[in-house]
Structures are given as C-alpha cells and as structure tokens.
Image (cartoon, helix red, strand yellow):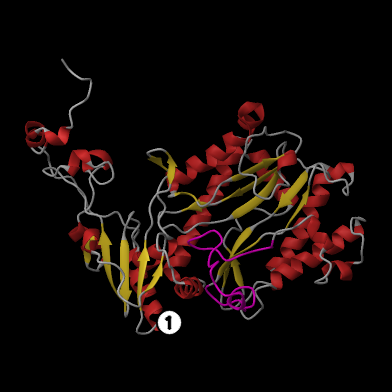
C-alpha cells in the first residue's frame, strides 16, 4: 500500500536515463545589449585608474524573497552591471588592474540531475541558458563556475549585496565614476526616455477607461506593461496620483479612482534592457482642461521648472537649478499669501517655510539607478559643479494636501510636478524628454488628443 509520498525523480535511475535523451541543442548565445561588453571594459579601465593597484570584488545579488519559496524578479546590482554588462543572479566579478574574472552559476543541461531537479538553474525550469564559455566569448573576459570562487582576495574592496563588510570607499568611487556618462550610456538613456514618452502616450489613451472604473491601477498597469514590453520594466514603482492623491510625493499604492475633474500626476520611467532608466513626470487634466485653480498651480510650477532648466550648464553649481526653482516657488506662494514670512526669510537656511508645499529636492543624478550615484560624497554630489556627461532631473512641484488647513479650499487636493531628464553638454544642456510638453496648454492638447 502506498504511503502517499511521491517518489523523488532524482532517485529513479530509469527516469534520469530517459529524460537525459532526445534533446536538440537550442541557441544559447547570451542576449547582450549591443555595446554593453565594450562599455563595461571601458568602465573597468576607469576604475583601475581611480584605484590603482587595488582589487575589487562585486556581487550581482539575488532575487529577494516575496513569500515562502517565491521571489520577486531579479534585478542586478547596478555597480556589477556597470563593470560587466552581465545581469546574472548569484554571480561575482573580481576586477584588478582593469582585468576581470567573472564567476557564474553554470546551467544544468540534459544529462545532469539538475536539468530537471534544480529550479534555479535547470534548463527544464528556466529555459535554455548560455554556458560559461558562451558567456566568456560574449563578454570578452574569463568566466568560471561560481563554485570556483574561493572568496575575496586579502585586502580586496567589496561591493554589491551580501558582503558582511562592504567597502564604503569602493561604493563611493563607483558612484562618482558613474556620474559622468559615456557615449554608450547616453545612448541607453536616450532610449529609456524615448520609450517613456511613448509610455505616457499609451497611458493617456487609457484615461477614459480609468475614469470609467479602472482607476489609478489601470493606468499604472498600462505603463508597467509597456515598460515590460519595450524595456526591462519600470525603473521604479510607477506613480499615478489622481485628485487628492496627486500631492502625495510617492503615491505608488495607486488604489484610488481616476477623477475626471481633477489633475492626474504621472511619474514614470522605462528601464531599458541595459538597466538605464528614465524618470519623467507630467501633470495632466483628466478631463482635458485645467480648472482655473489647477492652471494657477500648474503655471507657477512651470515658471519654477523653466527657471531650473535655465541653470543646467557645465561649470555651474549642481544646486543652481534647485535654488532657482525654489526662489520662483517661494515668491509665488508669497504673492498668494501662503507664507507667514517674507520671501528672504523663507529662502534663508533658518526658514524654508515654502517647503511645506515642496518638501523634496528639485533634482538628482539619473542612470542605472533612478536616484543615481547616491553613495557619492556630499562635496562630489550637491557640492560639485555640473560637468558634460552628467544626466540629471529637474523636478519642481507644489503639493497642496486636501487636509492642509493653511491652503485655501480651492487649492486643496491639487498636486503638480513637472520633471525632465537633462544631459549636460559642453555648451549647455539637452532636454532628453522635451517631446512631452510642459506648458498647461500643451498638456491639455495632449490629453484631448489621446482621448
């Protein structure tokens, strides 16, 4: 009589022998983004110049557990990607003098027990996977089994997930190197922005369906589907805020309705296959036309945005666009009678009263991470001057919460943000997301055309 237990397939010789036979050899060449291997080699050379004589070890990371034995999708560590052009889970790269050795988990193919028994690397579970030799040929570096990795060499600097003592020095150096994008990286960011603009159009096409009952999540899902189809996925949690949700800075719950008479704040970015991401925000009238109060707020944010854009140029302080936008916001709020102090007092380091309605910063670096280069030293980030090759965002806003009693009733529940992605050039800046209008009339036209 059976005890109810299923037999372990790996313990049945007849099954193991049978499943090992009769398989064709499918294509298994790594599907690299063109130019990724060459860009990674150049990045390693830059690292060697920054840390002469040092050895670094960077881990790719692993997918976090969602619940029990299921995980979220794997997303490679950004520093690992920058140095290798590879996005494989549980991998490690050792870099010394610009040369690299990559350690990867090998696939389990027909004839190996893992082929049918290993849910992580068995091809029966995950599909045809490149061999280590195929990875080596594609990347132009030695690739060995991860089991051969004996641990970091003595004195090596460590980065990436999983190390008990990661090197802050290495993370800082990598972050500051990544501030200046090379031509290949700029191309990837252009693609990310272009796909994002297309994603905005796809979302606006669906606004009537969202108003009819799909709500914010219908629009969030629309963009995320577009990002998954034409890139690696969304570069961060897509923000869709309608009406009273628009003033919430990171409204990623997206569990409310889309209200026809209210503004619709969309903060979205496609991460392309190379893992570079865009980060663009526009605020549309869901009905196709701003109300007078909504336009009043939007016009002030637009003036602040244009003031910030005008300050992006090589040689200027990184904070220049922040201060320019904040001054416009503070003066506008003062003119509306919303500040309890003078403009000068509000803008002083001991004031900042205007930031009740704009608590976040007005921009950041952009690249492999939506908030790129975050491990940099303060003096190399906010304390630095802009240089050609930097890619950054400018994103002022105003956020009048529905329950904020300091705000006139007609302004409560209005949130507006405008965000563009800019490349600093030798002579000024290029707005990579300029295909999307920033003025209220242009946004109304976009909203009406897509309905």
Q: Residue at x 31, y 66 (%)?
A: 93
Instruction: Give the vertical position of 172 relative to 413 (above or below).
Output: below
Tell which of 14 and 37 is nearer to you. 14
Tell me, yes or no, whether the highlighted magenta stretch contains residue 366: yes
Whether residue 313 appears in this view of the structure is yes
Which quarter of the figure has residue 384?
A: bottom right
The reply, left or right, for residue 350 in relation to residue 155 is right
Q: What stretch is highlighted in magenta?
A: 361-389
Rendering coords of residue 227 (x, y %): 48, 46
Which quarter of the figure has residue 58?
A: bottom left
- Indicate the quadrant containing the N terminus: top left, top right, bottom left or bottom right: top left
Instruction: Give the vertical position of 99 relative to 354 (above or below).
Output: below
Rendering coords of residue 399 (x, y %): 76, 50
Tell which of 297 and 100 is nearer to you. 100
Specify few, some or many for label 1: CA neighbours under 10 Å numbering under 14, 14-19, or 20 or more: some
Q: Which residue is drawn at 89% across and 55% down?
A: 338
Q: Is mark 1 on a helix, strand or loop?
A: helix
Q: Which residue is drawn at 17% across and 28% down?
A: 7
The reply, left or right, for residue 143 in relation to residue 52 is left
Q: Residue at x 33, y 69 (%)?
A: 38
Tell which of 61 and 22 is nearer to you. 61
Rendering coords of residue 221 (x, y %): 53, 37
Q: Mark 1 points at which residue?
A: 50
The reply, left or right, for residue 451 in relation to residue 179 is right
Tell me, yes or no, whether the highlighted magenta stretch contains residue 174: no
Q: How many numbered marks have been drawn onto this rendered protein structure? A: 1
Whether residue 263 appears in this view of the structure is no
- Indicate the quadrant containing the C terminus: top left, top right, bottom left or bottom right: top right
Q: Main secondary structure of the magenta part?
A: loop
Instruction: Give the vertical position of 227 relative to 352 (above or below).
Output: above
Rendering coords of residue 344 (x, y %): 88, 71
Query: Residue at the top extreme?
Result: 1
């Amino acid at each position: 009589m059976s005890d109810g237990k299923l037999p372990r397939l790996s313990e049945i010789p007849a099954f193991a022998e049978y499943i090992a036979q009769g398989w064709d050899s499918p294509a298994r060449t790594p599907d690299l983004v063109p130019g990724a291997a060459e860009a990674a080699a150049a990045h390693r050379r830059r690292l060697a110049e920054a840390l002469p004589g040092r050895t670094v070890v960077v881990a790719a990371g692993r997918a976090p557990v969602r619940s029990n034995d299921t995980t979220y999708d794997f997303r490679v560590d950004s520093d690992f990607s920058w140095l290798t052009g590879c996005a494989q889970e549980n991998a490690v790269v050792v870099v010394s003098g610009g040369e690299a050795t990559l350690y990867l988990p090998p696939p389990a193919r027909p004839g190996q027990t893992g082929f049918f028994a290993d849910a992580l690397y068995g091809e029966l579970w995950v599909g045809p996977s490149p061999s280590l030799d195929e990875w080596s040929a594609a990347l132009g570096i030695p690739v060995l089994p991860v089991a051969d990795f004996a641990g970091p060499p003595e004195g090596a600097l460590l980065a990436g997930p999983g190390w008990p003592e990661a090197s802050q020095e290495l993370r800082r150096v990598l972050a500051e190197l990544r501030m200046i994008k090379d031509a290949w990286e700029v191309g990837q960011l252009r693609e990310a922005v272009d796909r994002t603009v297309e994603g905005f159009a796809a979302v606006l096409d669906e606004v009537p369906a969202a108003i009819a009952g799909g709500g914010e999540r219908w629009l969030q899902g629309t963009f995320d589907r577009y990002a998954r189809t034409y890139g690696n996925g969304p570069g961060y949690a897509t923000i869709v805020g309608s009406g009273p949700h628009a003033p919430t800075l990171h409204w990623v719950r997206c569990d409310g309705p889309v209200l026809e008479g209210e503004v619709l704040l969309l903060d979205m970015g496609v991460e392309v296959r190379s893992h570079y991401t865009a980060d663009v925000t526009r605020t549309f009238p869901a009905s196709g036309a701003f109300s007078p109060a909504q336009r009043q707020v939007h016009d002030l944010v637009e003036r602040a945005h244009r003031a910030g854009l005008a300050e992006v140029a090589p040689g200027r302080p990184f904070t220049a666009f922040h201060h320019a936008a904040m001054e416009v916001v503070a003066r506008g709020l003062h003119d509306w009678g919303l500040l309890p102090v003078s403009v000068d007092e509000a803008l002083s380091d001991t004031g900042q009263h205007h930031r009740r309605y704009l608590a976040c910063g007005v921009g950041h670096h952009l690249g492999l991470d939506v908030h790129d280069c975050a491990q940099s030293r303060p003096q190399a980030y906010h304390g630095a001057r802009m240089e050609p090759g930097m890619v950054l965002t400018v994103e002022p806003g105003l956020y009048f919460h529905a329950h904020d009693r300091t705000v006139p009733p007609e302004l409560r529940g209005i949130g507006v943000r405008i965000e563009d992605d800019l490349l600093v050039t030798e002579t000024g800046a290029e707005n990579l997301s300029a295909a999307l209008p920033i003025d209220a009339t242009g946004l109304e036209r976009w909203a009406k055309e897509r309905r």
